[in-house]
Image (tube, rainbow, N blue to C red):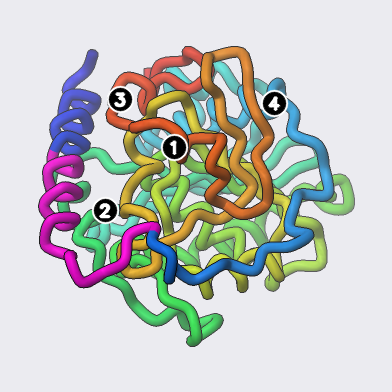
């Protein structure tokens, strides 16, 4: 395992410690109690069926976002070689928030991919559980670190999508947004805005996403973007933080839960289906780094 993955493992261990410390400090906050707000997510299931083959192909795009920026820009990274026929537009990086993404297109799709966390400091910052008002819908709150990361690159992402659409022309009929780990959280925030930027349909596949915002954010997300599959692998620990109910954090639907590498459940539209990942204690670093049995991240 390379040094980047070792850093990620140490970072995730820090997340576990912080999670339990925060839980013990929050006695006044209802965690999955009777008074927890019920989220209105009726009729929020995606309009297209889940496809494991597509999910496996897009996890490669998500993993490629971990590669070195110049290698992504030249599309000659090791993981990039697993993705033939992709035309890179730009690799995007913000040094202040340590946020990395890239945008490109295939013969009929524009694809946006976000990198997950790479170092200890980033993970610790990401899991302080602080919330901020969500500007597109001020009644909602989202994780402060996640939103700052997305906001720091949003204008570059939009201009890159514009360039991709200009090059791809009428052939591109869809926009796909993907990400793994922290990148999944950024992808969630991104696709919520992409849906309003263009008339083209937007779709998203995320892998190992933490909870991004509160119940009001989830309701807003479901109103504007239904075509989302949030994939969770077995006992992956990251989808369990921040804890459900802590500051009203709640997952966006639609979860696809893999109890094994090859079997899956398309969960209900609540975002917190009790028979899916909520039914297990998620403490596995290995499962977070091996979606579909494919090792993360940039190989």
Give yes or no for contact between labels 3 and 1 (Cβ–Cβ under 8 Å): no
Instruction: Estimate the spatial distance between the alpha carbons at disc 3 and disc 2, rounded to whole Å.
Output: 25 Å
Mark seen at residue 85 = 4
Q: Position of 136 compared to 68: left or right?
A: right
Q: Visible in this render: residue 170?
A: yes
Closer to the N terminus: mark 3 or mark 2? Answer: 2
Q: Hey, which residue is sitting farthest front in the picture?
A: 34
Between residues 169 and 39, which one lies in front from this camera angle? Answer: 39
Q: Point out residue 200 in the picture as x, y percentages from the top left corner.
A: 81, 60
| Mark 4 vs mark 1: in front | 1
Instruction: Estimate the spatial distance between the alpha carbons at disc 3 and disc 1, rounded to whole Å.
Output: 11 Å
| Mark 2 vs mark 4: in front | 2
Q: Disc 1 designates what residue? A: 208
Q: Point out residue 148 in the picture as x, y percentages from the top left corner.
A: 33, 68
19 within the magenta span: yes
Residue in the image at 87% along x and 45% along y: 171
Instruction: Estimate the spatial distance between the alpha carbons at disc 2 and disc 4, rounded to whole Å.
Output: 28 Å
Q: Disc 2 designates what residue? A: 98
Give yes or no for contact between labels 3 and 2 (Cβ–Cβ under 8 Å): no
State whether the magenta stretch is mostly helix, strand or loop: helix
């Amino acid at each position: 395992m390379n040094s980047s993955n070792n850093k990620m493992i140490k970072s995730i261990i820090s997340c576990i410690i912080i999670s339990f410390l925060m839980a013990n400090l929050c006695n006044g906050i209802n965690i999955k109690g009777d008074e927890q707000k019920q989220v209105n997510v009726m009729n929020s299931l995606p309009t297209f069926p889940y496809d494991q083959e597509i999910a496996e192909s897009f996890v490669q795009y998500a993993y490629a976002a971990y590669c070195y920026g110049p290698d992504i820009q030249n599309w000659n990274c090791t993981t990039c070689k697993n993705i033939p026929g992709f035309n890179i537009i730009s690799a995007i990086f913000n040094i202040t928030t340590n946020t990395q993404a890239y945008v490109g297109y295939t013969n009929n799709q524009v694809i946006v991919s976000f990198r997950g966390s790479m170092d200890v400091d980033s993970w610790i910052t990401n899991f302080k559980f602080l919330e901020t008002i969500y500007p597109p819908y001020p009644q909602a709150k989202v994780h402060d670190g996640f939103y700052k990361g997305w906001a720091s690159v949003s204008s570059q992402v939009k201009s890159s999508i514009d360039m991709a659409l200009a090059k791809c022309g009428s052939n591109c009929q869809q926009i796909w947004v993907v990400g793994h780990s922290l990148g999944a959280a950024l992808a969630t925030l991104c696709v919520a805005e992409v849906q309003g930027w263009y008339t083209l349909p937007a779709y998203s596949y995320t892998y190992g996403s933490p909870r991004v915002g509160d119940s009001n954010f989830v309701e807003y997300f479901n109103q504007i973007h239904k075509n989302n599959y949030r994939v969770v692998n077995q006992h992956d620990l990251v989808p369990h933080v921040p804890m459900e109910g802590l500051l009203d954090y709640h997952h966006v639907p639609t979860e696809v839960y893999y109890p094994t590498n090859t079997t899956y459940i398309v969960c209900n539209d609540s975002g917190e289906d009790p028979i899916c990942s909520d039914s297990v204690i998620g403490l596995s670093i290995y499962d977070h780094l091996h979606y579909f049995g494919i090792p993360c991240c940039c190989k």
